[in-house]
Amino acid sequence: MKTYKIALLPGDGIGRDVTEAAKAVLEKAAARSGFSFAASSYPWSCDYYLEHGSMMPANGIETLSSFDAILLGAVGWPRKVPDSVSLHGLLLPIRKAFVQYANIRPHRLLPGVQGPLRSENFDILCIRENTEGEYSGAGGRVHQGTDSEVAVETSIFTRKGVERILRFGFEQARARRGKLASVTKSNAQRYSMVFWDEITQRLSAEYPDVEVTSYHIDAMAARMVMAPDSLDVVVASNLFGDILTDLGAAIQGGLGFAASANINPDRSAPSMFEPVHGSAPDIAHLGIANPIAAIWSGAMMLEHLGETAAAAKVMAAIEATTARGIGSVPGKDRTDAITSAVLSALD
Ligand code: IPM
Ligand code: MN
């Protein structure tokens, strides 16, 4: 029997509740499909930081590198550790070290979920560049605390980085409905964003079957609200993709439904799967977090591992659950009740 080595990083807050739920569903789906998981859980989190002075051990990346995939809950507890420290100590270094350059986030309404828009028929796949751009981490501060203080944070766009994420976008569009929206702000940012637009144009010659349109980020934000059904695959830089995917979460009914995959397409290192919602300290430990986003992220992990039949079963179980009105209304059902319903729907 095939066994996949999975690293669990429950992290902080509701990350712990939803990771446990996703693990239970994935294990049952695996058993039904004739494979299994060997899961190892690591307590790396803000609590870990308070005890050890770092978010993960010095050999953390090396430890994770031997796994087939990583399932992450959430990172951050700003009252204990500043977000700028916790995220740069765990989540962001993993994305970079494992070259998880494609952050994929699906936005569509699950059955039974009421979104805030009139349109209910959208099915958008956002692809966010995940290793460079505005999150490159290049910058510094000088003359701190004085009137002359300066803060510089430089976006870095490399030919290699932009080309590979756009290619990934074209490939996804080709496998879906053949439409790619490439998002920049090249009317204002005339170096990096014009560079991105040029590469989009050049690559489009290699994908004559894909209809590609370039949009500015502000216009795309409006389009996602006014005409989401006109979109198929949307590709954007790290920060723009971050913002658009919270908007995507909102139009799909809330962050409790927003799944994501941090993919290393070359498979030279493990990919990482995480719900978009974060640690939600306000509802942590109350047992009311919606595990759907984490379970959906788990289905994306199955897909990535090549277990497409099991992935489809998990998605069908999620959809059967929300269609019955369980987990479909934010805040209505408890984590356990939703998880049990998904588990039963696997039968
Ligand atoms: C996300 C989150 C992270 C990001 C934060 C927590 C650093 O918002 O995954 O969307 O901006 O990438
Ligand atoms: Mn975000």
Image (spheres, rainbow, N blue to C red):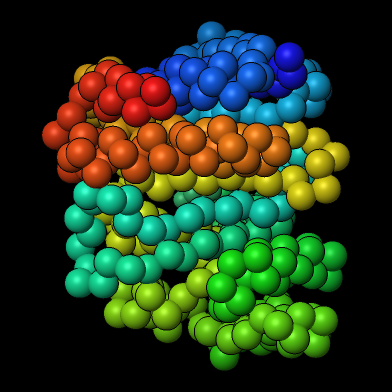
* Residue 186 horizontal/vertical position (percent): 61, 86
Residues 236 and 172: in front is 172
Using residue 281 as the reference point, say whether residue 278 is left or right of it: right
Count of picture labels: 0
Using residue 176 as the reference point, say whether residue 290 is left or right of it: left
* Residue 61 horizontal/vertical position (percent): 75, 26
Quadrant containing the C terminus is top left
Residue for point 24% across, 44% down: 323
Residue projecting furthest to the top: 51
Q: For residue 304, what is the image quadrant?
A: top right
* Residue 268 versus residue 217 in the image, above or below: above
Q: For residue 78, what is the image quadrant?
A: top left
Does the rendering let one see residue 235? no
Residues 204 and 145: in front is 204
Q: For residue 122, what is the image quadrant?
A: bottom left
Residue for point 28% across, 36% down: 321
Quadrant containing the N terminus is top right
Residue projecting furthest to the left: 332
Residue for point 65% across, 35% down: 307
Residue for point 23% across, 59% down: 115
* Residue 213 versus residue 19 in the image, above or below: below
* Residue 2 versus residue 115 in the image, above or below: above
Does the rendering let one see residue 164? yes
* Residue 187 horizontal/vertical position (percent): 57, 90
* Residue 264 versus residue 333 in the image, above or below: below
* Residue 101 horizontal/vertical position (percent): 71, 52
